[in-house]
Amino acid sequence: MSLQFLRKQQSVPRRSAFGHMAFQIFAILILSCGDVLAQTAEPVATAEESTPAPTVSKSRHRIPAEESRLSAGVFREGLKRRGLTEVLELHVRVFPTNNPIDVLLMSRDVKLAEFSAAGKLSAERREAIAEANRILQEIITDFPDDARHLEWQYTLLNSFLYDEAAPYVTNLLAGLGGEGDRSVLATIAEKALVVAREFSHAISAEYIQIDALPAEKFDALERSGFLETLDKYAPASDYLLVWSLFYDVLGRRPEDPEIAGKLNEIVLTFEAKPAMLQAPHVRSHIQVQSLLLAGMTQRRLNDHARARTFLDRARAEADNVADAGERQRLQWAVTLIEIESIANERDDNRIADAESRLGRLRELPAAKEKSGYTLRLTAAMLQRSVDQTLATAAESSGHADQAVKFRDKAIHDLSNMLIAEPESREELLAAVDRATPKDADIGRLDAIERLARVWALTREADRATAPSAGDILSRAIEIGESLVSSAETSARDMIPEAMFLLGTAYFKHGDLALAAKQFLSLATSHPKSDRASRAAALATQLSHDALNMSPQNADLISLHKDALKTLITTDANSEAAKYWRFRYAQVLDEAGDFSGAALLYSQVTDDHPQHMEAMFRQVLALAHQVRRVAGESPAPDGSASGNSITSLVASLNQAADAFDGATRTQLQASPDDARRSALLHLVAEARLAVAEVEVLPSLAAPTKAIERLAGFESTFPTERSLFARLWVTRFRAFDGLGRATDAKKALVELTKTDPAECGKLLQSLYTECVAEGDRLHRTGKKESATHCFVSAALLADALVAWAEANPSLANKETSRALNVQLAEASLAAGRLDCAKEIFERELSRHGTGAAALENAEPRVLIGYAETHFQLGNFATALPAFNRLATRLPAEDATRWLALLRDLQCRTRLGEPPDGILKVLDQQRRLHPDLGGLKFSPQFDSLKQENETRLAHKS
Amino acid sequence: MTHRRAIRSALATTIVFAAFTAASADQLVVSKVNYMSARLMNVEVGQIVFRSSDGAVHREWLSDVDLILIEHGGTFDDFNQAERMAAAGEPDKAAVRYERAMRLADEAWADMTAARLLRVYDRSGQFEKTAAMFVRVAQGKRTGPALAARMFPHEAPTKKDAKFARAMETLDAALAAEPGEGIRVVVEALRFEWLRQVGDVRANRIARGFPAMPIPENVGTESLYRIVREALGVWMEKEASPTAMDALDASIRDCPAANLPDFLMLKGDVLSRSAQTREEMIRASWPYLRIAIHMADDPRAADALFAAAGLMQRLERPNWAASLTDECLAHPRISASTKARATAFRSDVIRASGTP
């Protein structure tokens, strides 16, 4: 059994090692009695299936038919075997038996099933066994005359000692226990001791009664087997009594005055029943354990020499056991003998012997097994107690330096274990904290004790209710902060764990941002710590949660981004990184880092819940990036620019194809309606986004866009919100191909979509088109510029039509402005008749002749004049230009155009050149730059023309 | 009594006497066991009584008898030929011979022959005649409802034609004659079964009452309770009234052991459907768990375990749900569909609980 007794209770049910003590004795002594409860707890007498009732009546039955037809006992046993305790409990409650003892035994059975159930928490199991024992105690009290009384007492005593008390005893004997263990054990041991004494008295009383029986009654009793049973119980009662006494001692604080009396009672019992210590183990099967108990008793009575003797004898007797099975069963005792021997040498100030025995303990095969953590921890705790003894001695003798050295050494082993075996850190910290007095001054605790205290306080806070939980956590934070900032050498190795616990305490205290910062700090400053990965994940999660509460907080945004970056870059393959990669991509996306976002989106694995969305967003991010590159560095010839855009477009197409394929697969898998609808929306939007890129002038792939969007409306009939963008894209594509009719149709379709959105879209397109035309015109690409202006005229037309069709969205003023815009666009596109008609109509709104020129707005006036100028109607244009040239301020570019045109008209009309030249000279003097680069060369040209005219005239 | 009838009766009595007293070296095959040189002794309440060559007296349900050959000169030629034809898979030819034999037989032989006829009519799918012969067997003094309950037709109509209508009229007429409990229950069972097979709404109406009828012990066969289970399933599909629950409980109490898992499954299903509270869910799990515990080898145990696992999941006990599903998956007689569903469910439980 190696060191099972040293382990805390595991989820898998098993008897403790001390249970083995009982087993060893009574497996031989009272095999038949060992399973007393298993027999008595059978809830229903009939274990066999009953036969169908031969009745024809159909009267109403209160009890379901299966309850009368099938055995309740078999059913409950089946439920118990499966650990379905809640199901079993209700069945017992709903269908109780008439016998009150059976009812109670069944209730106990339920609790025992809970105690044995796999998957139960330790605390729940402890509560279950305590309740089971309480029920049995109640039975013993309430039914003192029942023939099973002795059996129940024996069972209860075993259950107290080997089930209920076992985890606390294990902790205390291994030096891993504390006040909590002691306190619980005291309560259990007190009850156990009462039962042990009653059991012992009951057996004695039975013997007295039997001795007084007449011969025939004695014979009858003997034939019934009762005497045999009694003979088996008698030695068990002594053995259980001495262990009960010892448990009682273990449950008391060291200064308790009762201890000596109880220990002496053990000594006296052993003296009164010497067979326990003397009968060879091979026969009694309890000699080794009894010698161990005697040794432990003497150590606690401070008789170290006698303790050593008993422990050495116990070791020698254990060594003499030849049977392999028996040796295996005694392994717990052998280990405990070593532990007790070390403690005995330490207490006797024989440090060298203690160290030597510690070496032996560490060399035990069990201590080297992976499962031997508790034994290794026990050795480390014993080493620590030895070092602390040495430190205290050094302090007493005035060797402060040596004392410091010993105190650092006292931490060393535990610190190493903390780092080397992180998966068991909680067991270590719990053991250290249990061994640390709760009322100790924090300032006097060493680093590992403080670390353990922070750990324990965070756990304690979980169990506490507000506001005390807050106070407990404040205390944990205070200690944790002091430890993290500590400069102690011995604390250095524990800093990552301290930072982690501090982050946990902040989190439990509700300070998400502080917790996230702490975890992030741990992940970045101790990247090799086993906590780093988890800390990075927690920093990410908590900063995200904090950000959800304060979405605009710049510090939190930055913290979250840093946490994401740390997690993704330092622990890229972890599950957390896999999960959060999508979020990090979103953050980059929102920040405009489209290429970074696209890369991360592409790394989101297909088991991620948002894998499809990641694929979709990758397409959008790449589309954004293409637009950015195309906008920032358009190719000089206006076609696709450079390698970077080529490779970007290739990536975009690849991503779009991959997304298309993935959605097809998903759609074929017949998802539910909501999922299908969501997928179709993503597909539609992705397709549109790619097409929008393809119609960019710098990519010049309108044909691809038209193909991509073919049948869009029928494929995605419900995606009406995308239709405006769809027609805009089609318009661009047709326009790019010079298919004016189709482009015009596209605009008509566009106006049928969302009217409110359509107006904005058309205007935005118009502005964009005019700007592009101007740019091309400036750069001398007249033909391309004209194409743009023609497109702009189409859009202006569409806008006027839209305004007429939607009077609620476009008031009179807007409508008029759109008409003027149409006239301007027509003028730019060379549609002079259209421009003339609109401008004249607009001008006429202000009257006729000079009045009209006086009141018309400059925009209309310049358009009217320019149109006539273009048409060669210089005489008509001149007054309007003159009006503007004389009225508008010099800062207004229109003024310079008007002046230029005014003088050009005069020149065409053959007015005297000297007058024109005079005006030009005068303007040159007043405004040396003559309207800037745009107009100055034209004025120079005009001047030259008039000078030539003047020369001819002369 | 006419002269002709008097002669027939006298002849029949002679044959019976001859058969039950003098017949020797008869042959019977019962449940695939061949009794050569047997001696047929009597027909009593659906059972045939005979002495085998070792002198032992046997009493076997006529429904279990595969072959009867009577060695008595030419008197039983038609009957014997009918038996051989039936055994050779020629039910139509056999029916003609049985009918001829029955015309000359007295009550005991006629009843027995009717039972044999029922068998061949069923095989040949003549529902109209099957219905008539089923009623005849149920009403027969020497056969009775106990035998009819063991001879529910295997074939069932698939359409509502004129023959089906006449068959139903025969059954309706039998019920209108206010028969005893046994006859009523078996005839009603057949009515329900056939109406259900053709999708007639009258089956639903019968389902809401027939399962609550008293079922005499000797009529409570596996076949009958299989139909009762069907009817209860229809009845409780939309409602679980106290009357229906009582009927279900009565079946659970009285049905043969082989039917019990089906009724317990139904009870679990009904209780699960309406379970809202924690206690109701636990109670609903009991019938399922009864199957898993008491009838662990039954093929339905795997289904029961899976259903119980579903309830444990509803109870937010993922560990129990997982372990019951594991037990279901490990069941040697698990069906492919249950296996597929349980495997998927197991994955969901793991995902939801976060435990491996």
Image: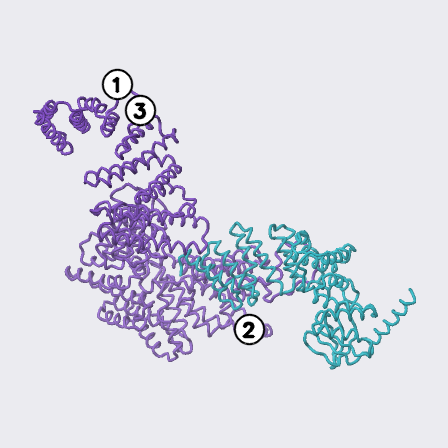
> Circle 2 sits on which residue?
A225
> Badge 2 local density, few (<14 within 10 Å), some, or many (20+)?
few
Per the image, label 2 sits on a secondary structure element best described as loop
Q: Which chain is purple?
A: A
Q: In this view, does B222 lie to the left or right of A674?
A: right
Q: Where is residue A848 in the image (x, y as percent from the top left)?
A: 28, 18
Q: Is residue A31 left or right of residue A880?
A: right
Q: Name the residue under label 3.
A: A841
In depth, the one of A834 and A705 nearer the eye is A834
Of the two numbered discs 2 and 3 in the rendering, the one whose residue sits closer to the viewer: 3
User: Residue A660: where, in percent of width, then height?
Assistant: 37, 53
The residues bearing labels 3 and 1 have C-alpha atoms spaced at a distance of: 13 Å
Q: Is mark 3 on a helix, strand or loop?
A: helix
Left/right of residue B225 with respect to residue A819 in the rendered view = right
Q: Distance between the residues labelled 1 and 2?
A: 140 Å
Q: Gap between marks 2 and 3, in whole Å?
A: 129 Å
Whichever of labels 2 and 3 marks the residue nearer the N terminus, that label is 2
Q: Which of A426 and A349 is in front in this view?
A: A426
Q: To which chain does the residue with label 1 belong?
A: A
Using the image, determine if residue B233 lies above or below residue A203: above
Label 3: how many Cα within 10 Å (few below 14, some 14–19, many 20+): some
Which x, y percent locates residue B223?
Answer: 67, 63
Q: Do the residues labelled 1 and 2 touch (CB within 8 Å)?
A: no
Q: Which mark is residue A849?
A: 1
Between marks 1 and 2 in the image, the one whose residue lies nearer the viewer: 1
**Residue type, numbered disc 1:** Gly
Image colour for chain B is cyan
Q: In which quarter of the image is residue A912?
A: top left
Which chain's residue wears label 3? A
Q: Position of residue A173 (x, y in %)?
A: 33, 64
Q: Do the residues labelled 2 and 3 touch (CB within 8 Å)?
A: no
